[in-house]
């Protein structure tokens, strides 16, 4: 079973006291560049919170202390009852995007 997507939230920046708010369960996440809406990352995972915490947003992981300029990112999550449900939902979404983009040309 798939739940609904969360609202878009600002992705925590390294070195700040900001937290990721995500389910500790299987599901999907989507990360986009806030200013343009361009897709940064999208994946079906076993644990959404861990996957977002380990996401590479620059040349270092979220936990690094590097002061490099990183893009302003937003993320949203969707919990599922299993990884299989998450993968099936991701495949449906990818199929819909490909169909949409194919018609846009």
Image (tube, helix red, strand yellow):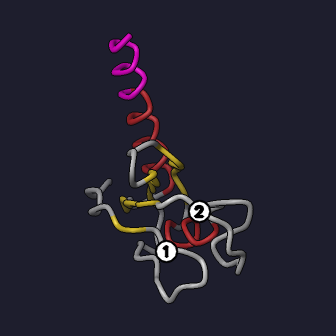
For label 2, the crowd category at 10 Å Cα-Cα, with few meaning under 14, some 14 to 19 and many 20 or more, is few
Residue span colored magenta: 96-105
Q: Is residue 25 left or right of residue 53?
A: left
Vertically, is 60 above or below 45? below
For label 1, the crowd category at 10 Å Cα-Cα, with few meaning under 14, some 14 to 19 and many 20 or more, is some
Disc ID at residue 33: none
In-front residue for pair 71/81 = 71
Viewport quadrant of the C terminus: top left
The location of residue 31, given as percent across then percent down, is: 46, 54
The residue under the point 50% across, 89% down is: 17
Q: Earlier in the sequence, mark 1 or mark 2?
A: 1
Vertically, is 56 above or below 104? below
Vertically, is 39 above or below 22? above
Q: Is residue 84 left or right of residue 96?
A: right
Vertically, is 94 above or below 19? above
Q: Which residue is disc 1 drawn over?
A: 12
The residue under the point 46% across, 68% down is: 11
Our reading of the magenta stretch's main secondary structure is helix
Secondary structure found at label 2: loop
Q: Nearer the viewer's eye, disc 1 or disc 2?
A: 2
Viewport quadrant of the N terminus: bottom left
The residue under the point 38% across, 36% down is: 93
The location of residue 33, given as percent across then percent down, is: 45, 52
Q: Quadrant of residue 36?
A: top left
In reply to whether residue 56 is colored magenta, the answer given is no
In-front residue for pair 91/58 = 58
The residue under the point 53% across, 85% down is: 16
Disc ID at residue 70: 2
Q: Is residue 38 left or right of residue 51?
A: left
């Amino acid at each position: 079973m798939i739940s609904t997507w969360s609202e878009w939230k600002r992705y925590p920046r390294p070195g700040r006291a900001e937290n990721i708010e995500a389910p500790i369960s299987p599901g999907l996440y989507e990360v986009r560049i806030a200013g343009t809406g361009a897709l940064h990352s999208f994946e079906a995972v076993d644990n959404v919170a861990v996957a977002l915490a380990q996401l590479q947003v620059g040349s270092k992981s979220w936990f690094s202390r590097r002061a490099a300029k990183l893009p302003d990112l937003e993320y949203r999550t969707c919990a599922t009852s299993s990884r299989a449900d998450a993968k099936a939902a991701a495949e449906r979404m990818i199929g819909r995007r490909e169909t949409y983009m194919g018609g846009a040309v």
